[in-house]
Image (cartoon, grey):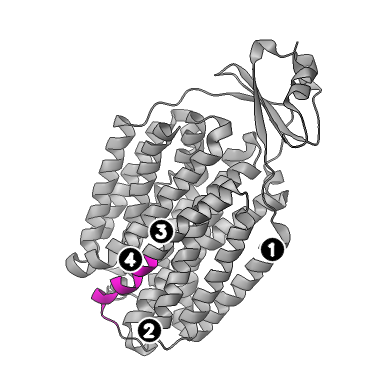
Amino acid sequence: MFKKVFPLSSILFLRFLGLFLVLPVLSVYALELEGATPFLVGVIVGGYALTQAVFQVPFGTLSDKIGRKPTILFGLVIFLIGSLVCAYSNDIYTLMIGRFLQGAGAIGSVVTAMIADLVEEKTRGHAMAIMGGFIAMSFAVAMALGPVMASHFGISVIFFITAALAILSIIILFAKVPTPPKIKHIYHKDTKTSDILKDPNLLGMIIINAMQKGLMTAAFVIIPVFLTKPEYGFNWERSELWMVYVPAMIAGLVAMGPAAVFGEKRNIPKQIFIVSIILFIAAFVLMGTTTSSSVFVAAVIFFFVAFNMMEPLVQSMISKFAKVHQKGAALGIANSAAYFMTFLGGTFAGLFLDVSGRETLGLSIGVIGVIWLIWTALKMQNPQRYSHLVIPHGEVDFDKLNTLESEHIAEWFINETENVVVIKYASEKLEEDALKAKILK
């Protein structure tokens, strides 16, 4: 399974690494461009996410028609062009166009769908966790390298590196990614896409995913600005920003592993998410109110730990809560919402800096975090543990199968490519032998 997931996860790693490398420093560099205002800088920091949100579904639809690989190639070429536009930009509006183009290559959901094509359903949750872990690692690596590279070479060089990473991703796509089999599923009942939003667990995960990404861009508007602009009381040099990002990155990486293990193995993602939200609240309140550099650094560490604790679990939990024929739609909705909130987070922070002060911004985000915490504590549940019974197609009595209904059976479907019937059931409530007796010839 890992061999199938690794190349695609590597493509996402390289693409997100390119996007994330500029995040720690983009706001302070963009403020110096012709026509820049804090509001426009906020739009630029999160701008790629707006076009990501808009094009997630069209790219997914396109991949169904022309194939996953051609669609991913198309998205990477657009990302490459956007990176070059950013690299050559001399004013705020050209940079904005480049950022929008970077996001327009919206391949996230296509890669997720391709992983689902290549990986069996029973290991898909693990595959999604691996993919989330690669994204989290790209975030951590970028936070360490971005400030150092920007201070030595300038922001334009980072955008050229981003373009090179896009080219490397294209090479991996055709050299290492296998062509997925054609898979068609048949289900025992239809479910409307609107049912996704009616499921409190899926809705909770969509909110968690969106809030996490929105707070990410808000943080990367305010952290470098607060630390380097004299009016906010710290007056750091840009070349010193690594001193806050590196320890925060290390702490985030250390926290990511145990959070993923405990969340997956012990089935306690809700508790992991609650701890993360509390850390988010503390981070923004402290960043908004403290006058101590040490406390500010601690707040940034809280933020990174919270982000990295969540990231490996988010996609996996959505995959677990969604029924098999809803996974693509659920992930598409979740990713679109997340990208839209990524745009809003940066725009909100930039607008707030235009009209208000540091303390008000930090406390306002803290209040939003408290509301998010209460929602999660009251509405979200840990996922039910299920097992998968896989039976060869020829051994199944389909008259019996078509009448199979139980509160302890989540779903069943036919995988026509592998010529098997798969039943997802609560093993603690149903015996495998008793289940087989109900459907075998």
| Nearer to me, 79 or 271 | 271
Question: Mark 2 falls on what kind of element?
Answer: helix
Distance in Å between CA atoms under marks 3 and 4: 35 Å
Going from N to C along the chain, the mark reached first, 2 or 3, is 3
Callout 2 amino acid: Ser
Residue 247 in magenta? yes
Q: Which mark is residue 377?
A: 1
Over which residues does the magenta segment extend? 236-249
Q: Residues within 10 Å of mark 2 (few under 14, many from 20)?
A: some
Question: Mark 3 falls on what kind of element?
Answer: helix
Question: Mark 1 falls on what kind of element?
Answer: helix
Which residue in the structure is indicated by mark 4?
Answer: 93
Going from N to C along the chain, the mark reached first, 4 or 1, is 4
Callout 3 amino acid: Leu
Residue in the picture at 76% in, 20% down? 401
Callout 4 amino acid: Tyr
| Nearer to me, 393 or 156 | 393
Which residue in the structure is indicated by mark 3?
Answer: 253
